[in-house]
Amino acid sequence: MSTNILITAIGFIGLGGLLKSLLDFFIGSRKTKQEAQLTFKEVRYKAIILMSYALLYYEREKTMLVVNRPDINSIGRLKNELQAEFINMSLYASDKVIIMLKRFLDFPDSDSLNNLALSMRKDLYGIRTKLKADALHLTDKGI
């Protein structure tokens, strides 16, 4: 009878190890996928913020824009690029970010840009904040 107990114990240990390995694999796979999604979202959001800023301050930023993105050589082309990003973001962005980018595209001003930045920040990192759009306003004093 002790042989049967020994075989059963070895079976349970083997089965437990197998289950742990499978669980570790699935958790690791999911974590890797989430990290890749976050990295992709960060890259896209940074590009969108920079293009939005360039749209808002086109005259002073157009040289930088042409250097970094030679394919965007006019304000019309910049608007088209942002509209394409708007469509693409339906695949990965939160509802709030999509709404804020639409608002910015409809009414490009510093308030809508700042609200877009805050919504992206919350979507990326889940940061709870009491900041409002006006907290991100900068003045040209001292520049």
Image: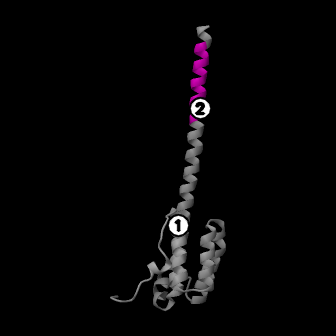
Determine whether 94 is above or below 72 in the image: above
Q: Nearer the viewer, residue 2 or 109?
A: 109
Q: Residue at point 57% right, 35% down?
A: 20
Q: Residue 69, percent across and down? A: 52, 80
In the image, what residue type sits under mark 2?
Answer: Leu
**Residue under numbered circle 1:** 122
Query: For the view shown, which residue lies furthest in the top direction?
Result: 1
The magenta stretch spans which residues?
Answer: 5-20
Front residue of this view, candidates 36 and 108: 108
- The answer to whether residue 39 is above or below residue 116 is above
User: Which residue shows up at 51% across the image and 89% down it?
Assistant: 58
State whether residue 132 appears in this view.
Answer: yes
Which callout, 1 or 2, points at the residue further toward the start of the chain? 2
- Most distant residue in the left direction: 142
Mark identifier at residue 18: 2
Residue 119 found in image quarter: bottom right
